[in-house]
Image (tube, helix red, strand yellow):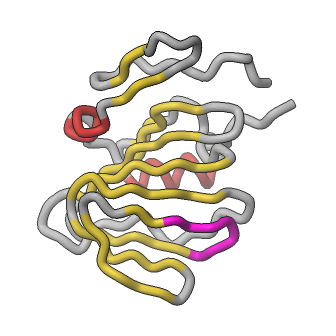
């Protein structure tokens, strides 16, 4: 069940704003201090903010979110993006939109970690979820421990 207030993270680079409910993140600071494969930074009723760090040679993994749009912004590194039938290289400062129902994958194509943040609408993962590795994230999804909150 949803509360009226979004969840609050105590995370370096995250700051409570002056407006009620405002969250502020210095994304470069958060990215530098989060080596985790996937970390949910914020979950609201209609969207969710997640930061991801993909090791060299690693990937998000081919997937389809049937009812969730996804917007990915690349903070550092280089990726080979596959969205539907289209492939292209993406890097720092670029943004990719993945409409709901579209098969996609992002593979780290560089020698350094690939860091990105993504917005899911509606939320896709469990509130406050932290998965240190892709294997841990996959296991949480398969076991049902990574289910997003749902409106009542």
Number of numbered discs: 0
Identify the residue at the far front of this view: 19
Q: Is residue 127 magenta?
A: no
Furthest residue in direction right, as rendered: 152
Where 54 falls versus 5 (above or below)?
below
Q: Position of residue 59 (x, y in %)?
A: 36, 67
> Residue 98 colored magenta?
yes
Q: Quick check: 112 left or right of 83?
A: left
The percent coordinates of residue 142 (x first, y second) are: 61, 54
Overall secondary structure of the magenta section: loop
State left or right for residue 107 relative to residue 56: right
Residue 47, position as x, y percentages in the image: 63, 41
User: Could you say where residue 17 lies in the image, as x and y percent from the top left?
Assistant: 44, 15
Judge whether 17 appears above or below 29 on screen: above
Q: Residue at x 36, y 23 (%)?
A: 14
State the extent of the magenta-drawn residues as a range. 97-103
Residue at (69, 71) in percent of width and height: 101
Which residue is at the front of the view, 1 or 86? Answer: 86
The image quadrant that residue 33 belongs to is top left
């Amino acid at each position: 069940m949803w509360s009226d207030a979004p969840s609050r993270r105590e995370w370096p680079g995250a700051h409570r704003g002056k407006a009620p409910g405002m969250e502020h993140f210095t994304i470069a600071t958060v990215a530098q201090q989060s080596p985790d494969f996937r970390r949910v930074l914020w979950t609201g009723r209609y969207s969710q903010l997640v930061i991801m760090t993909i090791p060299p040679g690693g990937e998000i993994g081919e997937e389809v979110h049937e009812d969730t749009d996804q917007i990915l912004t690349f903070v550092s590194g280089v990726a080979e993006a596959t969205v539907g039938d289209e492939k292209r290289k993406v890097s720092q400062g670029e943004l990719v939109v993945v409409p709901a129902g579209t098969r996609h994958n992002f593979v780290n194509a560089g020698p350094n970690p690939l860091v990105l943040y993504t917005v899911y609408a509606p939320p896709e993962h469990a509130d406050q979820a932290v998965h240190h590795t892709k294997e841990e994230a996959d296991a949480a999804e398969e076991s049902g421990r990574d289910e997003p909150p749902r409106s009542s």
